[in-house]
């Protein structure tokens, strides 16, 4: 199972815990994500940018993601990203 599917499966947010989160639902509620991109990421066909991963992580109401054994605090990353713009 790839990281995006695992991330979707462990979302603790009550709004998602009682229903499946669809690719279309994620895309429709998140500016910058498309259903095609979410589908490609889940299949392992896409190499999303860190910014796209941040969007996906926030759409799933997660505060942290772990990639390649490195944990990233999304709130801190977003603050740093916004302050450097």
Image (tube, grey):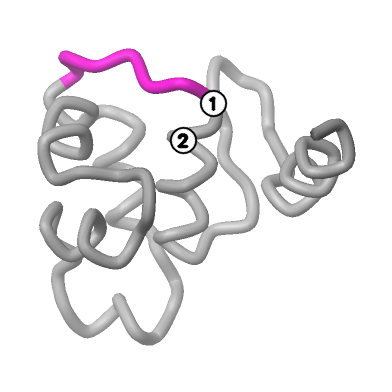
Residue 21 found in image quarter: bottom left
Residue lying at 11% horizontally and 35% vertically, measured from the top left: 36
Residue 52 found in image quarter: top left
Give how far across and how far down residue 10 sits, in percent: 37, 58
Left/right placement of residue 65 relative to residue 20 reads: right
Dominant secondary structure, magenta: loop
**Secondary structure type for disc 2:** helix
Disc marking residue 53: 2
Residue lying at 12% horizontally and 24% vertically, measured from the top left: 43
Give how far across and how far down residue 61 sits, in percent: 49, 65
**Secondary structure type for disc 1:** helix
Name the residue tied to disc 1: 50
Left/right placement of residue 28 relative to residue 56 reads: left
Give how far across and how far down residue 45 sits, in percent: 16, 14
- Distance from Cα at disc 2 to Cα at disc 1: 5 Å
For mark 2, does the 10 Å Cα neighbourhood hold few (<14), some (14 to 19), or many (20 or more) residues?
some
Residue in front for this viewpoint, 42 or 35 = 35
Span shown in magenta: 44-50
Residue 14 found in image quarter: bottom left
């Amino acid at each position: 199972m790839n990281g995006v599917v695992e991330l979707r499966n462990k979302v603790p947010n009550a709004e998602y815990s009682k229903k499946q989160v669809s690719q279309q639902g994620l895309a429709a509620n998140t500016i910058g994500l498309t259903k095609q991109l979410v589908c490609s990421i889940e299949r392992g066909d896409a190499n999303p940018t860190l910014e796209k991963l941040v969007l996906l992580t926030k759409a799933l109401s997660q505060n942290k993601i772990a990639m390649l054994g490195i944990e990233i605090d999304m709130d801190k990353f977003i603050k740093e990203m916004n302050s450097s713009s």
